[in-house]
Image (tube, rainbow, N blue to C red):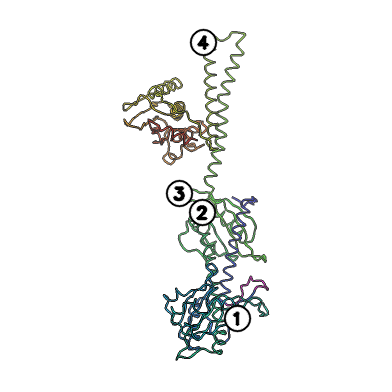
Amino acid sequence: MSITDMGTHDSEDMNQQFEDLVRRIQELEAENQSLRSGSPAPSASPSEPKPAPVESGMEVASIQEGDMTLRRLVQRIAMILQAEKIVIMFYETETGELMAIPPAYGVDDERLSHFRVRATQGISGEVFRDGTPAIFHDATGDQRTRKDLVSLLHVHNGITVPLVIEKRDEENRVVDRSTIGVLHAFNKRHGEDFNDEDVRLLERMARNVGSIIANLQLYKAVMKEREELLQTFESLTSGLLLITPEGKISQMNSSARTIFRIETEVVGRNYQDVLKEETLSAFLDAGVRGEESLGAEITVDIHGSERIYQAQGATVRNEDGKHLGFVAIFNDVTEQKNLDKMKSSFVAMASHELRTPLTAIKGFSSTLLDGVDAEIYSKDDQKEFLGIIVSECDRLRRLIDDLLNTARIESGQSLKPSYTRFELKAILDKVVRVQTQASHRHEVKLKVHTELPGTIVGDEDKFDQILTNLLNNAIKYSPEGGDVTVHAWWDGKDELKVGVEDQGIGIPKEHLSKVFERFHRVNNEDNRKIYGTGLGLYLVRHLVEQVHMGKIWAESEVGKGSMFLFTMPSELDIEKAEAMND
């Protein structure tokens, strides 16, 4: 099938959503690369701030080694300041607290996890709010440190400096400053006190700590957002495929792998080496070339069963219009296509079903009209002609009723039941007698296998309709004649079981679960000339399951006939049944 321009509002909206997601993935990849290299992302605008520079003389590893770099830096600070303990506290916006984070020096993780303070309290909060370093010589006696839980860490003296992040422009001018936490140095060794020179040293080192923490936090945020987006892609029920401008597969979600039966890793491989179906290849080729708003219908054979997928694709570009790749979405439209075919078939069948009784009615009416004056036809002839007209009118009424009832069910309106107590055997006999008169090629009979209840509770007219539709169906699909038998069983308690058996053409096994779907018909040589709307069994299922709270199923063998069976309560709970049908 050739590639066609979709041009629909829904597909445009969907494509736009996926374009935005893919573009964000690309941006995150660029940010990730930027963090790894220590330089701004390629897509960053000139006015976007650069990461804060790092003090010279300090070793800064790549972002992957950020935690280890920070640990080494903390150890170096402790060595330079001759401090027993170094603690970093990071401000948590959600809780409004300064919280100690690893790595620390001289403090185990258990104690560190309890070291937290409100940003409005203690010396930690004061330094964080004011941005001014503080030095204290007697932690236990200093009013400022009481809220800092210094006793938890056995602190005697110390320095606290702010962790400040500076953002700079292209000309290295500071355009923004923000405080992200504080840095503590506790307990000067050898019983000495910290001095102003120690404060200046710690301030300089705090800039490096702040820079590393900021990059680590940004990196983690980038990776988290990227992972969330990838998980979103992976969980989509639609198949999703991302291809780079170079033709490499950058993402293929679970649904896409299932569609194309991909069991090996394909990310990084050229799509032409992986996806070789002709229509799909043409669709992807056009997308990689940069063609916009593409659509195609792809047929894929999955384990011997053909599935039809609607493929929609769009070129992904960044804000500058640079080509970032191609995104393709695959939606399974097999059932929709089958339903469209069934509807088309239904229109043809319904037209025939309507035309046939109308033709008979018109023909015999015209015949009678022509012979009125000439008295050509005897009373018996006229009676026969009128009987045929009445029969065809009944047939036409049943067809119209089926159509109207189906419309009600499809619109969510149940067929309002009228529950009464009625005689079971009487209605079974009646339906069999009527169908016996309707067909001279079939022997319609009733076979009762167990003692039946005298009366049951249900909707008598709809119970009649269930049996009538099943018998009509059995006679229709037994074109060579034969026995059509109504079977009846009762368990002696509360369940009635009824079956309608024929000796007709039978139903293929793969269609047994579908015969109760609307418009469904089995197309083969045996029933090609058997007309019907495909609504009779659909209505029967509704009348059994919804009206009588029962179950229905079919058993069949091709060439030997079919048996349609249903069970229902013999003493229906009317209140419960009416509640279901409200």
Nearer-N-terminus badge (4/1): 1
Nearer-N-terminus badge (1/2): 1
Amino acid on which disc 3 is placed: Gly
- Element under label 1? loop
Residue 512 can be seen, yes or no: yes
Image coordinates of residue 329 in percent, x first then y, are 56, 55
Nearer-N-terminus badge (2/4): 2
Residue 45 is inside the magenta segment: yes
User: What is the number of the mark on residue 304?
Assistant: 3
- Element under label 4? helix
Task: Kindly indicate whether the residue at mark 4 contacts the one at mark 2 (C-beta within 8 angstroms).
Answer: no
User: What is the number of the mark on residue 237?
Assistant: 2
Q: Is residue 372 left or right of residue 153?
A: right
Image coordinates of residue 86 in percent, x first then y, are 48, 82
Q: Which residue is found at the position 51% from the left and 10% from the top? A: 380
Image coordinates of residue 311 in percent, x first then y, are 57, 53
Residues at marks 1 and 3, CA–CA distance in whole angstroms: 62 Å
The residue segment tinted magenta is 38-48
Residues at marks 1 and 2, CA–CA distance in whole angstroms: 45 Å
Residue 356 is inside the magenta segment: no
Task: Kindly indicate whether the residue at mark 3 contacts the one at mark 4 (C-beta within 8 angstroms).
Answer: no
Nearer-N-terminus badge (3/2): 2
**Closer to us: 580 or 429:** 580
Nearer to us of marks 1 and 2 is 1
**Looking at the picture, does residue 399 appear above or below residue 172?**
above
Task: Kindly indicate whether the residue at mark 2 contacts the one at mark 3 (C-beta within 8 angstroms).
Answer: no
Amino acid on which disc 2 is placed: Thr
Amino acid on which disc 4 is placed: Asp
The residue pinned by badge 1 equals 53
Amino acid on which disc 1 is placed: Pro
